[in-house]
Amino acid sequence: MPATKTITTPSLRGVNLVKTYGDGDARRTTLHEVTIDLFPGQLVLLMGPSGSGKSTLLAVLSGLLEPDSGQVLAEDDGRLLDVWHLTPKQREEYRRRNTGFIFQGYNLFPALTARQQLEIVLKWGSGASSGDARNRSEEMLSKLGLLKNKNKKPALMSGGEKQRVAIGRALVKNPNFVFADEPTSALDWENGEKVIELLRDAAHERKASILVVSHDHRILPFVDVYYHLEDGHLERRPLPQH
């Protein structure tokens, strides 16, 4: 079971978040005044049926999708930022410094090798030197069992390899927040377990706040907090006992 942590101050808060889509009879409320706290050092799992608003909530909290109302409050170098009151340029800078993303569609650059996918994040996002970026990228690829594939481009990778590269890219700069949308969906459980353990280590050892959206119940024994979202309503649920 995950270790118990005494943490009093959230690093990220979503407060009374509302998001709707469509107009008239087609109008649908995806988030109904959702409030959620994410704490440093915790791996948080968000589950729920397809279409329940999980990916919408992840996008709102991460600064990618503006809510209709509510606040997203994030700690940034000792300051508390209202993410959706920042200018687009300020919000982009905030995400560059603080966040890592794992998308369902991988979002890899077709012309870059596996190692280059990670190096570009370190150079652009963290200002790392070429040598440091290369060393850190290869270290992360090794943890993911991908070092032998470091010179492969996405067209020559399997779906599982692309997913692991995307996960390495999200973690390599040691972000404060990681947002993962179905990170194990393209993986067999041997590799899926390896990925979840990496995410858990990033939370517990580096004190990142990590939110995972998933349908994969095998993740439950690895997480610290479990939320269920259905029909736009969020509920915190107890973790299963083992």
Image (spheres, rainbow, N blue to C red):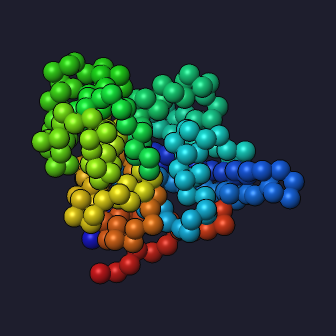
Q: Position of residue 27 (x, y in %)?
A: 80, 55
**Residue at 43% across / 29% down in the picture?**
96
Q: Eyeballing the image, is 18 above or below 119?
A: below
**Residue 120 shown left or right of residue 145 in the figure:** right
The answer to whether 97 is drawn above or below residue 15 in the figure is above
Number of numbered discs on residues: 0
Q: Residue at x 61, y 62 (%)?
A: 51
Rendered residue at 40%/29% (across/down): 97
> With 114 as the anchor, is 216 left or right in this view?
right
Q: Residue furthest bottom?
A: 242
User: 39 and 49: which one is in front?
Assistant: 49
Please state which of residues 157 and 212 is positioned toward the viewer in this rendering: 157
Q: Nearer the viewer, residue 117 or 72?
A: 117
State the image coordinates of residue 175 (x, y, percent, origin top left).
Answer: 35, 38
Quadrant of residue 68 within the rendered picture: top right
Determine which quarter of the picture holds residue 111: top left
Residue at the (14%, 41%) spot, across then down: 147
The residue lying furthest to the front in this view is 156
Give coordinates of residue 38: x percent, y percent.
47, 52
Q: Quadrant of residue 152?
A: top left
Q: Residue furthest left?
A: 148
Would residue 87 be visible to someone looking at this image?
yes
Expressed as whole percent of the image width and height from the top left, the position of residue 203 reads 31, 51
- Quadrant for the C terminus, please: bottom left
